Amino acid sequence: MRTRQSVCLKKASYRSIEEALFAIQRSGWDLRVYRCDRCRLIHLTSRTKGKRIPRPKD
Ligand SMILES: [Zn+2]
C-alpha cells in the first residue's frame, strides 16, 4: 500500500502517537493512527478494516 506524498502533506500529522490519540479524543471520531513511512510522522485514518459492525436483525 503506497502513501502518496501529496496526500501525506495534506494530512494532519503528529510527532507522537500520544499527540494523535489526544486529537482523536478531542474530535470524538473513531479514527486510527499510523506511522507514515514517508515523513515518519503520525497520521490519522478513518479506516476500520477488520472491524465488523453487525447488522441489526429485522
Ligand atoms: Zn506522511
Image (cartoon, grey):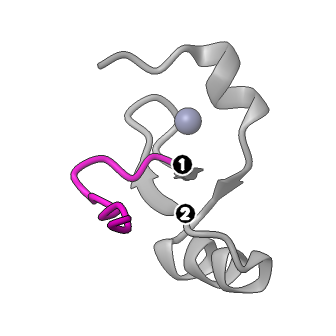
Q: In which quarter of the view is residue 8 placed?
A: top right
- Can you say whether 41 is above or below 19 in the image? above
**Is-magenta flag for residue 3?**
no
Q: Amino acid at mark 1?
A: Thr
Magenta span of residues: 47-58
Task: Identify the main secondary structure in magenta.
Answer: loop
Residue 55 appears at what percent x and percent y? 35, 61
Identity, as a three-letter code, of the amino acid under mark 2: Leu
Compared across the picture, whether 12 is left or right of 54 comes to right
Residue at screen point 40% across, 50% down: 35
Q: Residue drawn at (66%, 85%), measured in percent from left and top?
A: 25
- Is residue 53 inside the magenta stretch? yes
Q: Residue at x 54, y 48 (%)?
A: 45
Residue 17 location, x and y as percent? 48, 72
What is the distance, in whole Å, between disc 2 and disc 1 at their CAs? Answer: 6 Å
User: Pointers 2 and 1 in contact (CB under 8 A)?
Assistant: yes
Up/down of 58 relative to 45, above or below? below
Q: Is residue 55 above or below residue 11?
A: below
The residue labelled by disc 1 is 45
Q: Quadrant of the C terminus?
A: bottom left
For ligand 1, the image quadrant comes to top right
Q: Quadrant of the N terminus?
A: top left
Give the SS element for disc 1: strand
Q: Which residue is mark 2?
A: 31
Q: Quadrant for residue 19, please give it.
A: bottom right
